[in-house]
Amino acid sequence: MRAEPVVRGPVLAQMTGAEHTAKRKIVVRCFTGQALQDRLRAIHANAVELMAPFLPRGRVDLVNDFGKPFAVHVTLDVLGLDRKDWQQVAAWHSGVAEFITSPALTPERRRHCMECAEQLEAYLVPVIEQRRRRPGEDLISQLCTAEFDGVAMSNRDVTALIINVLAASTEPADKTLALLFKHLIDHPEQLAQVRQDPNLLPAAIAETLRFTPPVQLIPRQAEKDTVFAGTTVPAGATVFCMIGAANRDPGAFTSPDTFDIHRPYLGAARSFTAAARHLSFGTGLHQCVGAAFARAETETVAAMLLPRLDQVRYSPGFRYRETGLYTRGPVALPLDFTPVHGLG
Ligand code: HEM
């Protein structure tokens, strides 16, 4: 509900029952199975292209030079939006994300965020109308042609789901990638193991998500008075379920403050499904629809980067800083590595 002013309509997180199941299914279809497999080649090619200018220099800021544009490009491709608009869409998206993820906003920031949302909506509505007339394979077309209760979704409903997916898919992506490299650089023996055996990558990504979840909390509203751990949570109260804390619960994880890609329950088979021990993708009916996609996206790009970033280390003078409460990640991650010439 808090997101509704900038998302311009209802999002999956606030839906229940048949409506939630039906609309969630449309999104899931575009991010799993064959659709995901088809997407991976484009993700790899896009990552190679974005990284190319930085290779001969031997220096890249993994958040701002690479991760952020990469995350927006990938989402635009799935939605079927033009990549050349990425900077504009990224600017609008950052206003929307600021509104959703900030516990408090000054009136000026609030106005800025609302303007971003209005401009994003004005950009999307003509696209939606065009896809209604000439649908393609992309997610916007799927949303435009789907019916719920025998009725097509309105432009407002489709706009809300597009912005929902744009924010949900883009916000955690660059953070996950940067945090993966940070932890591996901080643990050189584990970095060497991953370089030697790329099959360890899914476990390294899963441990990154457990150790430093990019989505730190899930807000919920209590439906009725509920006693929880001896405290009454009154009906209507907002509860922040802290994923970051749950993932460091010593009752659930041995040495929770240690980054260890060899934890026995990590790995692709569990960590990106409802059976995951960590809570980085949430749990229950509203568990993330993009978990398999996020794994494939991060794995593809990390497998592309690792051999290219030989002798990877922090750039001289770098001081690590994180930002964000709802979603959290490094402000920047400037890295030096052995310059590469002529690698496509
Ligand atoms: C590492 C990457 C990701 C992380 C850590 C993450 C995390 C989460 C979390 C914690 C939730 C639960 C929210 C709640 O219960 O209210 C969620 C829901 C969701 N995520 Fe992700 N997500 C990631 C990637 C993606 C991607 C790539 C997509 C693309 C579609 C996506 C789409 C969604 C959507 C649409 C929901 C709402 C589902 C619902 O309410 O039924 N996420 N995500």
Image: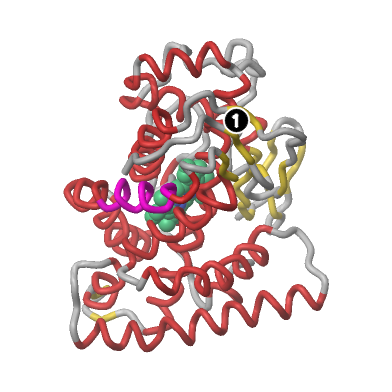
How many numbered tags mark residues here?
Answer: 1
Toward the viewer: 170 or 278? Answer: 170
Residue drawn where x is 32% and y is 59% of the image: 27
Relative to 63, residue 254 above or below: above
Q: Eyeballing the image, is 44 above or below 155?
A: above
- Quadrant where the N terminus sits is bottom right
Q: Is residue 105 left or right of residue 336?
A: right
Say above or below: 119 vs 38: below
Point out residue 269 in the picture as x, y percentages from the top left corner.
31, 25
Q: Nearer the viewer, residue 181 or 288?
A: 181
Q: Is residue 213 left or right of residue 124?
A: right
Residue count near mark 1 (Cα–Cα under 10 Å), binned few <14, some 14–19, many ≥20: some
In the rendered image, which quarter is residue 21 located in? bottom left
Q: Tell me the amino acid under the disc marked 1.
A: Lys
Name the residue: 37% across, 59% down: 17
Q: Quadrant of residue 250?
A: top right
Q: Main secondary structure of the magenta part?
A: helix
Q: Is residue 273 visible?
A: no
- Establish if 218 lies above or below 339: below
